[in-house]
Structure formats: C-alpha cells, structure tokens
Image (tube, helix red, strand yellow):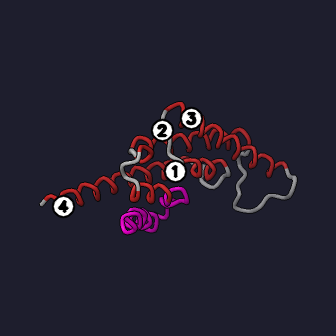
C-alpha cells in the first residue's frame, strides 16, 4: 500500500520535473494515499476523484476571480490589507462552493477541498496551471488503474 501511493506520486513528480509544470501539488498526495489504501471506498471511485478535483478547480477559479484576482499567498499580505481580505474571502467562498458542488453532484472527494484552496489563494490560477491539476489527477487515476490491473493479473496467474 505504501509503495503504491509512493509510486503513484513518483510518476507524476517525474513528469513535473521533466516538464517544469505543476503536475505535483499538495492535494494530490491525499488522493494517492486514498487510492492506495482504500481502493474500494466510494470516495475513491475515479469519477469522484476526478470530478471532485474538477469541482474544486472551478470553484477556486470563480472565487479567486471574484475576490482576489491577481493576488497570491506566495507572500503574506499585510495585516488588515484589502489583498489579505480578498484572499481570505476567496478561500472561504471556494471551500463553500466546492463542498456544495461535490454534494450536489455526488462527486465527494475530500482532497479536492485542498485543491480549491490552492486555486482560490492564487497559487495555481492560469489556464495552463489549472489544466495541469486536472491532467495530474487523470494521470494519477490512469496509473492507479494500470497498477490495479497489473496486480490483479499477477495474482491470478
């Protein structure tokens, strides 16, 4: 199980290193862990993993552009600043929208709540960066399926 989560993330880390793009981000770790440790859980169904992160990206982008466009948490904003307030509101609104969106669509995947904060707080907001998030999740799921198929095939031979 530990090896599987590590392998899932290692493959994407290699892609990130080779491309210089953000194919590894904090919420990918909990998704890899959940896929490796609880593969039969409802929240690790591929539609929920991908869909949850997609909801998180969309909600994060909406909140970011409404409340904090151009700002980023890469440096602490000054206390009581308008920038800090915008980022705080963006994060809170994004989390609320993500939670509601995942419940309404039945795409519940808790790590997506971290994804929405990554976007809403201005860390990954460009079209290329948000596409990298979704491509990473798709890659994680594809590799997980490949590993599951491989281990199922070897145990029946």
Between disc 2 and disc 3, whose residue precedes? 3
For numbered disc 4, what is the local secondary structure?
helix
Query: Cβ–Cβ below 8 Å for labels 4 and 2?
Result: no
Of the two numbered discs 4 and 1 in the rendering, the one whose residue sits closer to the viewer:
4
Of the two numbered discs 1 and 3 in the rendering, the one whose residue sits closer to the viewer:
3
How many C-alpha atoms fall within 10 Å of the one at disc 4: few (<14), some, or many (≥20)? few
Query: Cβ–Cβ below 8 Å for labels 1 and 3?
Result: no
Between disc 4 and disc 2, whose residue precedes? 2
How many C-alpha atoms fall within 10 Å of the one at disc 3: few (<14), some, or many (≥20)? many
Residue at the disc numbered 4: 155
Horizontally, residue 119 falls left or right of residue 12, namely: right
Between disc 4 and disc 1, whose residue precedes? 1
Spatial CA span between label 1 and label 3:
23 Å
Query: Cβ–Cβ below 8 Å for labels 2 and 1?
Result: no
* x, y percent for residue 131: 49, 48
Residue at the disc numbered 2: 107
For numbered disc 3, what is the local secondary structure?
helix
Residue at the disc numbered 3: 101
- Indicate whether 17 appears above or below 31: below
Spatial CA span between label 4 and label 2:
31 Å
Spatial CA span between label 3 and label 4:
39 Å
Disc number at residue 128? 1
Asked if residue 138 lies in the magenta stretch, the reply is no
The residue lying toward the viewer, choosing from 142 and 106, is 106
Q: Residue at x 55, y 60 (%)?
A: 26
Question: Which contiguous range is marked in magenta?
Answer: 1-29
Between disc 2 and disc 1, whose residue precedes? 2
Query: Cβ–Cβ below 8 Å for labels 4 and 1?
Result: no
């Amino acid at each position: 199980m530990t090896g599987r989560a590590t392998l899932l993330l290692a493959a994407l880390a290699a892609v990130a290193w080779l491309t210089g793009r953000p194919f590894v981000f904090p919420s990918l770790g909990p998704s890899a862990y959940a896929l490796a440790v609880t593969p039969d859980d409802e929240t690790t169904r591929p539609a929920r993993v991908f869909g949850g992160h997609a909801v998180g990206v969309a909600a994060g982008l909406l909140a970011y552009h409404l409340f904090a466009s151009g700002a980023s948490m890469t440096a602490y904003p000054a206390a009581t600043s308008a920038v800090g307030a915008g980022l705080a509101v963006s994060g809170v609104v994004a989390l609320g929208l993500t939670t509601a969106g995942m419940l309404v669509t039945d795409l519940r995947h808790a790590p997506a709540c971290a994804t929405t904060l990554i976007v809403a707080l201005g860390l990954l907001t460009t079209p290329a960066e948000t596409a990298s998030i979704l491509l990473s999740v798709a890659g994680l799921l594809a590799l997980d399926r490949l590993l599951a198929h491989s281990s199922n095939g070897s145990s029946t031979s």
